[in-house]
Image (cartoon, rainbow, N blue to C red):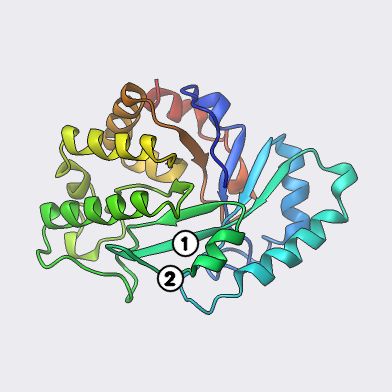
Amino acid sequence: MYLREKCYDIHELAKSNLHVHTSFSGCAKPEMRMKDMVRRAGELGLEMVAITDHFNDPATPILEKNLCDRFVLENYRDDVKTKFLFGAELSAVGVGKYLDSDEVNAKLDYRLYAANHYHLDMWEQPEEKSPRGYAEHTIKVLTALILSHRADCIAHPCIGGYVHALGDDKGSLTRAITDNELGDLLSLARDNNVAWEINEGEAIEFADFSERFWNIGKEVGVVFHFGTDAHTLQNMDTFKNMSVLEKIFK
């Protein structure tokens, strides 16, 4: 549905925020109303914003909700230069297992998939609850997702921050993925027109992996998208931590 051109300039990528939640997502603040988000995007000079509310239940009325947001946007169209995509943060809950139907998938502007929300009850868990066990399972889930052609982009990829079984060492999952495995996965996505998200918060928290992910991605020629996973109006700002990001994404 949407795939930007290859770009390896973090400043250019940050001109768009392709991971933003409205208050429809229970984890987002009440201030995340469409009219206020439109105003905020204009203040920040964002070229593009993707609305990506959580889709953690097959009964989620995401298309109806997006239609309402489109209606609100129409009232501001003459004053808005930002382009809005109305998508969802979809759920790849296991190997070849997705909560969204083919019909819902086809009607979204932007299909951002989370494949590592292991903290949720419906998420498939590997038999081996070790860093390597989760690494192997993550690779299988992402391989199936890429080959399914359901995704435009993969959100906060490979990060183990949601894996309770790993305890406090959340970086152990990504350390268990080899450079060769990461390169193969990134190449597969390149060949199937799937982008990888640079998620601002996760990038900073897991800087070592983010730098490795970025460098291998540039080497194999993947497409990156940028998102802040905004749950507040303040966090729609893609440049607020740019001085930190510049050190990671050289």
Disc on res. 99: 2
Q: Position of residue 94 (x, y in %)?
A: 29, 65
Per the image, label 2 sits on a secondary structure element best described as loop
Per the image, label 1 sits on a secondary structure element best described as strand
| 64 and 227: which is toward the camera | 64
Disc on res. 122: none
Q: What residue type is labelled 2?
A: Leu
- Tell me: residue 158, above or below residue 88: above
Q: What residue type is labelled 1?
A: Leu
Q: Position of residue 68 (x, y in %)?
A: 75, 67
Q: In the picture, which quadrant includes the C terminus?
A: top left
- Tell me: residue 50, above or below residue 240: below
Q: Position of residue 57 (x, y in %)?
A: 47, 76
Which residue sits at x=68%, y=36%? 46
Taking the image as shown, residue 174 lies to the left or right of residue 162, namely: left
Q: Alpha carbon of mark 1 to alpha carbon of mark 2: how far?
A: 7 Å
Which residue sits at x=39%, y=23%? 247
Q: Position of residue 180 (x, y in %)?
A: 17, 33
Displayed quadrant of residue 176: top left
